[in-house]
Image (spheres, rainbow, N blue to C red):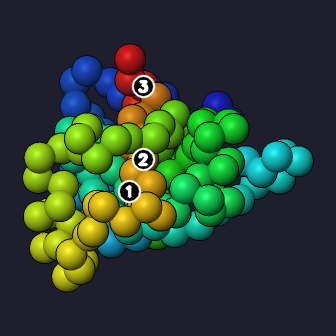
Amino acid sequence: MVEGYGLGDAPADGTVLPWSTIEGWLIAARNYWVCSQRADGRPHAMPVWGLWIEGALWFSTDPTSLKARNITRAPDVVVHLESGDDVCAVEGVARAVAVTDLPVEFVAAYAAKYDISLDLSEPNFGLYAVEPCVALTWREADFPVSATRWTFD
């Protein structure tokens, strides 16, 4: 964001949206847009179903999909929610995840959220996690007051 938009790092005094509110948006979201980079540098954006657990977005995609091939080659991604009113854009690094490394609650929480049972033994089932490096957040209703850049280690 350009400086004139007033987007600064989250102040310690809590005068902007608390991270717990942003995590609530991430948990409640049904669709997450994953933006990756094609081999020729063009952007690629596709929605996925996923879960926000343990401070990361966990999702699946066929390992031969363009999205997965992009992530394998260039793991820097942006994930954003559907809303232009309650905005959360997470910049992070996507990584492939083994079934054994999924959070314990993943399968049951996925079934509860999407009413579908996952078959983790399916060979075309790739699992990925994106942990945030930076998150840009705001509410349209009170922009730029609520606009915040969150940085993570």
In the picture, residue 16 is in which quadrant? top left
In the picture, residue 151 is in which quadrant? top left
At label 1, the amino acid type is Phe
CA separation in Å, label 1 and label 2: 5 Å
* Quarter that holds the N terminus: top right
For disc 2, the marked residue is 128
Disc 2 versus disc 3: nearer the observer: 2
The outermost residue toward the top is 153
For disc 1, the marked residue is 59
Q: Nearer the viewer, residue 100 or 1?
A: 100
At label 2, the amino acid type is Tyr
CA separation in Å, label 1 and label 3: 22 Å
Label 3 crowd (10 A; few <14 / some 14-19 / many >=20): some
Of the two numbered discs 1 and 2 on the same chain, state the one appearing first in sequence: 1
At label 3, the amino acid type is Thr
Disc 1 versus disc 3: nearer the observer: 1
Image marks 1 and 2: residues in contact by CB distance under 8 Å: yes
Image marks 2 and 3: residues in contact by CB distance under 8 Å: no
Of the two numbered discs 2 and 3 on the same chain, state the one appearing first in sequence: 2
The outermost residue toward the bottom is 115
- Image coordinates of residue 80 in percent, x first then y, are 49, 56
For disc 3, the marked residue is 151
